Amino acid sequence: MRREGTGPGAGAPETAPPRQEPLRTEFEFELPRGYVDESGTVHRRGAMRLATARDELVPLRDVRVRENPAYLSVVLLGRVITRLGSLPSVHDGTVENMFASDLAFLQDFYRQINAEGHTRAAVACPHCEESFEVELAGSRLGES
């Protein structure tokens, strides 16, 4: 006869190791204005994945980037945007035809998700002591 609390595994109850959240690699966004396709449909909701080293290196070989370094962000965003509205695919040609405000939004969004949100700092006003956040990443994507 075996009594409870004796034998192998008896004693203090085992605690399960802390459950680790899976790495999030894709992030939803909504463009401030929206991309207008050839038929006039506006696409605002989309998703962007985390960039790989390859995503950042491959555009450097692109002739358009060599001729105009500011084009780097267009090519790079065309690689990492996985979905935009009902478009069948997103590529650098899509990004090229976006409004400037949407391009700026996507550049900032890229920087935020690839820096794990560490581009903001909490500060307090020296006069009223109100707390708020400031953006530390000042330059545009693809610029030094």
Image (cartoon, rainbow, N blue to C red):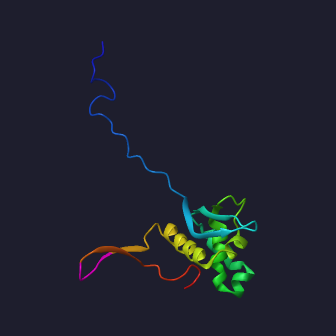
100 is within the stretch colored magenta: no
Residue 119, x across and y down, in percent:
44, 74
124 is within the stretch colored magenta: yes
The furthest residue to the top: 1
Is 115 situated left or right of 72 in this image? left
Quarter of the picture containing the N terminus is: top left
Seen at 27% across and 24% down, the residue is 5
Is 144 situated left or right of 21 in this image? right
Query: Residue 63 appears in which quarter of the rendering?
Result: bottom right
Count of marks placed on residues = 0
**Between 53 and 72, the one nearer to me in the picture:** 72
Query: Residue 15 appears in which quarter of the rendering?
Result: top left
Residue 36, x across and y down, in percent:
68, 69
Quarter of the picture containing the C terminus is: bottom right
Q: Taken as a whole, is the magenta stretch helix, strand or loop?
A: loop
Seen at 56% across and 77% down, the residue is 104
The vertical placement of 2 against 91, above or below, is: above
Seen at 33% across and 73% down, the residue is 132
Is 127 situated left or right of 114 in this image? left
Residue 102, x across and y down, in percent:
59, 73
The vertical placement of 2 against 65, above or below, is: above
Query: Residue 35 appears in which quarter of the rendering?
Result: bottom right
Residue 14, x across and y down, in percent:
33, 36
Stretch of the chain drawn in magenta: 123-128
